[in-house]
Amino acid sequence: MIQAQKVSYRSKEVHIINDIDFECNSGEFVAILGPNGAGKSTFLSLLANELHQKGNKILLKSCDYNQWCEKELPKHKAKFSQHNNSDIPLNVEDVVMMGRYPYFDHIPSEEDKKAIQYSMECIDICPLQNREYNHLSGGEKQRVHLARVLSQLNNNVENKLLFLDEPLNNLDVLHQHKILELIKDFTIKGNTAIVVIHDLNLAAQFADKILLLEKGKKVCYDTPQKVLTQDTLSKVYNFPCIVTTNPVNNNPLIIFGK
């Protein structure tokens, strides 16, 4: 689905990402983990073609981003950013409709309207659709933008790619799990999701693979069982932890503390 070879990124003289090789396949849920400043969001933006640096080689579906038609690309991949404009003078339905802009010029079709309705149902924001966006809580705004991004990929294209940068911010426990279950279902259908997340236990529960970063470098990239070990996590996060087995699903269960 996506391949990256020796990807680096430097801001002025600061190396934020250093020579990372990465690839993932259709149907995979990949979580990107690491402490603050590890380069998680920067690497996600590089993979999503939002940041560029000379020499990087990133392929989407075996094609360099430069080979993609600019109008066609948004139908294959979408990105949710952790920082969204907090002042949008529109109602919720109109904000979600922004995800359909690649599909129409002036007036949305019935297909576009069905797509946003489906997305709002999935994210559980239908009761908010006529509310003003600016009057919503932080968690409600978060869900609106998730619905917007989901509506962008509500199409007949196969093997879609979803990038999400900390999509669980401001969400309660119920909606955190609902969103992750929705992303998991998205990948089960043959699509791919690459998600920056801070909660290691949620990553262990939902991700097929985990990319662990530290100071802009790849520490390891493998299954949760192989990445989330006591020695590795204690070293990378510079804090002691215990890794045991979750009795509910047999995934790693991480407990930090002295």
Image (cartoon, helix red, strand yellow):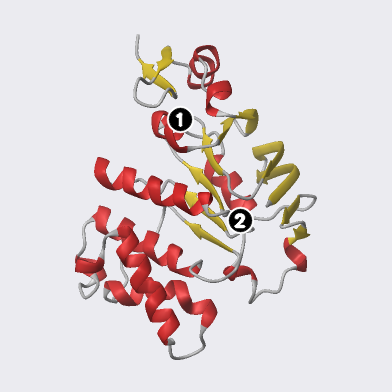
Q: Residues within 10 Å of mark 1 (few under 14, many from 20)?
A: many
What amino acid is at disc 1? Ala
Q: Nearer the viewer, residue 110 or 81?
A: 110
Residue at horizontal 53 percent and vertical 45 percent from the top: 41
Residue 58 left/right relative to 258: right
- Corner quadrant of residue 211: top right
Which residue is denoted by mark 1 in the rendering?
Answer: 204
Residue positioned most to the right:
55
Residue at horizontal 29 percent and vertical 77 percent from the top: 90
| Quadrant of the image containing the C terminus | top left
Dot 1: element: helix
Residue 96 left/right relative to 99: left
Residue 64 left/right relative to 203: right
Residue 251 left/right relative to 220: left
Residue 92 locus on image (x, y percent)? 28, 71
- As measured in the structure, the alpha-carbon distance from the residue carrying label 1 to the one carrying label 2 is 23 Å
In this orientation, does residue 207 appear?
yes
Q: Which mark is residue 253?
A: none
Residue 79 locus on image (x, y percent)? 51, 58
Which circle's residue, 1 or 2, is located before the other in the chain? 2
What amino acid is at disc 2? Ala
Residue 8 locus on image (x, y percent)? 71, 42
Which residue is denoted by mark 2 in the rendering?
Answer: 48
**Residue 159 drawn above or below residue 152:** above
Q: Residues within 10 Å of mark 2 (few under 14, many from 20)?
A: many
In this orientation, does residue 170 appear?
no
Dot 2: element: loop
Between disc 1 and disc 2, the foreground one is: 1
Residue 51 locus on image (x, y percent)? 63, 55
